[in-house]
Amino acid sequence: MNPVSLSVGQLIDMCRRGDINFRFSAKSSAIEGVRGHQRVQQSRGQGYLAEQPVSIALKTGGIDLEVGGRIDGCWYDPARALFCIEEIKTLRLEVGDIPQGVLDSYWHQVQLYGYIAGNHAGVDRLILRLCFYHLDKKTETVLERVSDIQELAAIFFDTVGYFSTILGQRQKWIAARNASMRDLEFPYGEFRSGQRDMAVSVYRAVADDRQLIIEAPTGIGKTMATLYPSIKAMESSAASRVFYLSAKTSTQALAQIALKDLTAAGGSLRSIVITSKGKTCFSPGQPCHPDHCEYAKGYYDQAQDTIDTMLGEAEHFDRSIVEFAARRDRVCPFELSLDLSRSCDVIIADYNYVFDPVVYLRRFFDSNNRDSVALVDEAHNLVDRGRDMFSAEVYKESYLAIARTFKDTAPTVMRAAQKVNRAFLGYKKRYKSEFEAHGHITGYEIPESVVSAMQTFCSSAEEELRKETYGSFRDELLDCYFNTLRFLRTAENFDVDYAVLFQRESKKHGLKLYCMDPSRQLGEGFDRLASTICFSATMQPAKYFRRMLGASDAASWYRLASPFSAANMQVNVAGYVDTSYKGRNQSLTDLVDLIQCVITARRGNYLVFFPSYDYLRSAVQVFESRFPQIPLLVQQRKMSDEERQNFLGAFKDGGEVCGFAVMGGAFSEGVDLKGSRLIGAVVVGVGLPQIGIERDLIRNHFPEAGFEYAYRYPGLVRVLQTAGRVIRDEEDRGIILLVDRRYRERRYLDLLPSEWVPRFCENTAEIAVNLESFWSHEQELFRPSGP
């Protein structure tokens, strides 16, 4: 087995003790931290060596280890005739306010570095220093110890021994996993048509540590076709784990089912679902601090025992299992899920845990190991999700509210918030004519006066937050602080891919750093991975996704043909109904008559998709007035999980339900209504995103294909995802009706799947004839033979 390489930081993280103590510490941003380190290093005298790499190789518990890292600074002190090493920490609080557990971990880090460096230098004693640099005061506080090498050796080998015990258990599990997967047959017996080809391509990509982008039709079985081969291929690749990434809980649930099926077939696998902290917290509104949350107290003393118990009880860990164990042992459920994930082979999570620059799991991605595989489900969503993750927005009114709230209790915070408000007003005044003409301001340069005021606000907010007074006022300040901090961190990445947008939304004024092109930062996420498999039923046109996903130039692209008979689906195009924004009100009667024609041609379950809620509501009113005898199931804004489940639960085999929904919403993708649970879909319009400032910024950013990148291609992706709800397996039969004249145009027609054979109709009567023919043919197919 190859040597295991790890950093001193990873060792420290694995061996923490005591409480979770996320006391407000005002951590610096990455750039501020680097600059602070450099100021300290440049202030040191001659002979000071900065950023010195050190490492040590050893064998412990039968495992070959290489432990290394970079010492911030080292030098020889001739006055004391001792070798010195220094670790620099940047902060915005007094050293005396650092929680003891955090300070202990800092000393632990410098002690490990001390042993590695001292052992290499062959010295008996050395000086260990912690230098705390206050970013606002520009001052240093130095803590110093003189340590014997024997003392440091004991600490080092005790730490490594603890780690090697955990690592040894993990390696035994990996060996058992690999052995179980090596000869494991496909768990569902025979592959579906095209599914084996997909699985083979995934296996080769993971084994060769490559990127692969796959367009595979709905119903081919993409979940198992990616999980099964990627887990098998880990044995011969650089990968230690697989991330299954999806933004939808329904898709994540399918991955959980597939993994349990692999286990039932004989595979030894461990998996976990990472649920956001906001959903799992047992003490909502309370800080992660032992004085305020009992689940934070002694967490690191108990967590490993809890994990060992869980690993002996189960192999697959969803939210309910994690929360049960956390309550039983009085530990934080969110931190438990993150720590447990180290012992799992598959981690099911949202995209942001790999790609978001603030949220991504540093425990897996801050080393140079690149030992994770990412399976990115519904990868067509990653472009817009990337824009969301890499953008940031703050509101002028938030600072006014803070100023009012803290007028009497924290005048420094009040003045800082007022300063931000004045900076907003100054920016608005500077571009007064543009704002009055359009209701918004767009630009391509950071508003430095606003950023400067925000930095002052953050410093004042940090001082107040460190007082640790709790209540709704603190929560309000904390939310505003973190939103501001995210804005400032986004400003550090601001480049030609960004625009500045100041606009009035309802009664609020928002300032947004909008990422028009997420490809560079998505690419940085891909670079943290050993291999990436992006897959979706809609990855066309390929040139668009090649440009926007940020995949490597060496990435392979693979498109699978539909395995289903074209005779199982009829596609009609009603180009005579005007669905344009200007004409849709006049054509509502024609539209609802057309819908009624479709759903009565064959009784069953149908979904009708609209491009917006406004259009949907207008159609509902007209439909219910003309056909009151036909009940409708209507999607509402911001439906709860239970409401969404009830909506889908109404679509039963043999039922007669007509649902009105919105393209791009909860029911347009990641929904699996097989058999007669859904026999038809009506798609109204070409799915164009609503015209708006942000979409126009994208259009202007890509002059070679601006309208396509901003509107047409994202719109057709929504259409194809929506239509993909109808045919889910070989036995399904159903109809799709596309309602818009633009489907006749070559620029749209060329984007439709090649297996579709659209029938262009001039009126509803013609569509009725086509439907009658299709459904009659089905009756012929399933009519019993014999006399």
Image (cartoon, grey):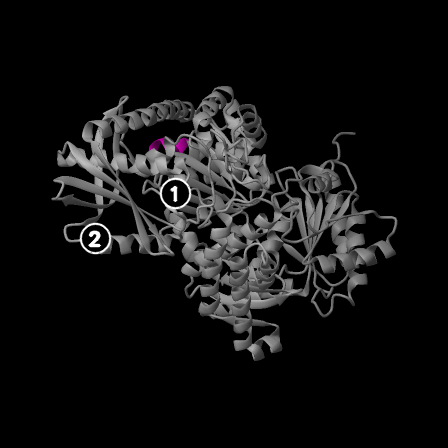
Label 1 close to label 2 by CB (< 8 Å):
no
Q: Tell which of 576 and 207 is nearer to you.
A: 207
Where is residue 702? Give x, y as percent: 47, 67
515 vs 517, nearest the viewer: 515
Q: Main secondary structure of the magenta part?
A: helix
- Of the residues shown, which amino acid type is indicated by label 1? Gly
Residue appearing at x 55%, y 66% in the figure? 421
Q: Residue at the spot x=25%, y=25% of the render?
A: 154
Tell me if I can see residue 188 in this picture: no
Instruction: Give the quadrant of residue 61.
Output: top left
Q: Horizontal placement of 666 versus 238: left or right? A: right
Q: Is residue 233 magenta?
A: yes
The residue sitting at the bottom extreme is 433
Query: What residue does disc 2 label?
Result: 44
* Mark 1 neighbour density, 10 Å: few (under 14) some (14–19) many (20 or more): few
Against 528, residue 695 (above or below) is below
Magenta region: which residues? 232-238
Q: Which mark is residue 96?
A: 1
State left or right for residue 499 relative to residue 787.
Answer: left
Say which amino acid is labelled 2.
Arg
